[in-house]
Image (spheres, rainbow, N blue to C red):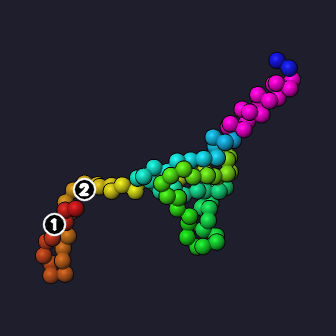
């Protein structure tokens, strides 16, 4: 393989890796937040974080990191707990 072909293949591989690292998918049951250098991106301008909705989204490769948050209902079954009211009556709380 000639040096020109080797360089072309190398550039194609680099372009493929950068392209693959610049997109991310947010599923229907998720929301995405982008961290840029470890800090929430978009909070400086508006005061609230930019939340990415479901679909194909873009990010800066190797600089941004995506945190996906599950929006489905999550339940936790806990043991019943007993509490006392102001009138000193026992109240059982079962969630």
Examine the rendered structure and indicate whether residue 3 appears above or below residue 47.
above
Q: Nearest the camera: 87 or 76?
A: 76
Label located before the other in sequence (1 or 2): 2
Which quadrant is home to the C terminus? Answer: bottom left
Q: Which residue is mark 2?
A: 78
Please rate how many residues cluster around mark 2, counting C-alpha atoms within 10 Å: few if below 14, some from 14 to 19, many from 20: few
Assign the magenta stretch its main secondary structure. helix
User: Is 53 displayed left or right of 80 in the figure?
Assistant: right
Residue at 63% from the left image edge and 40% from the top image edge: 20
Examine the rendered structure and indicate whether residue 40 appears above or below residue 10.
below
| Mark 2, secondary structure of its residue | loop
Examine the rendered structure and indicate whether residue 87 appears above or below residue 60.
below
x, y percent for residue 13: 72, 32
Q: Which residue is mark 1?
A: 92
Residue at 60% from the left image edge and 68% from the top image edge: 43
Task: Please provide the residue range marked out in magenta.
Answer: 3-17
Distance, label 1 to label 2, CA atoms, is 12 Å
Residue at 64% from the left image edge and 72% from the top image edge: 45
Please rate how many residues cluster around mark 1, counting C-alpha atoms within 10 Å: few if below 14, some from 14 to 19, many from 20: few
User: Is 58 displayed left or right of 79 in the figure?
Assistant: right
x, y percent for residue 14: 73, 36
As for residue 16 lying within the magenta part, the answer is yes
Whether label 1 touches label 2, CB < 8 Å: no
């Amino acid at each position: 393989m000639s040096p020109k072909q080797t360089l072309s293949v190398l550039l194609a591989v680099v372009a493929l890796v950068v392209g693959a690292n610049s997109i991310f998918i947010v599923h229907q049951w998720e929301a995405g937040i982008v961290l840029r250098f470890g800090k929430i991106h978009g909070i400086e301008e508006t005061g609230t974080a930019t939340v990415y909705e479901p679909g194909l989204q873009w990010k800066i490769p190797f600089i941004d990191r995506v945190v996906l948050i599950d929006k489905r209902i999550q339940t936790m079954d806990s043991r019943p707990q007993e509490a006392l009211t102001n009138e000193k009556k026992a109240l059982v709380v079962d969630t």
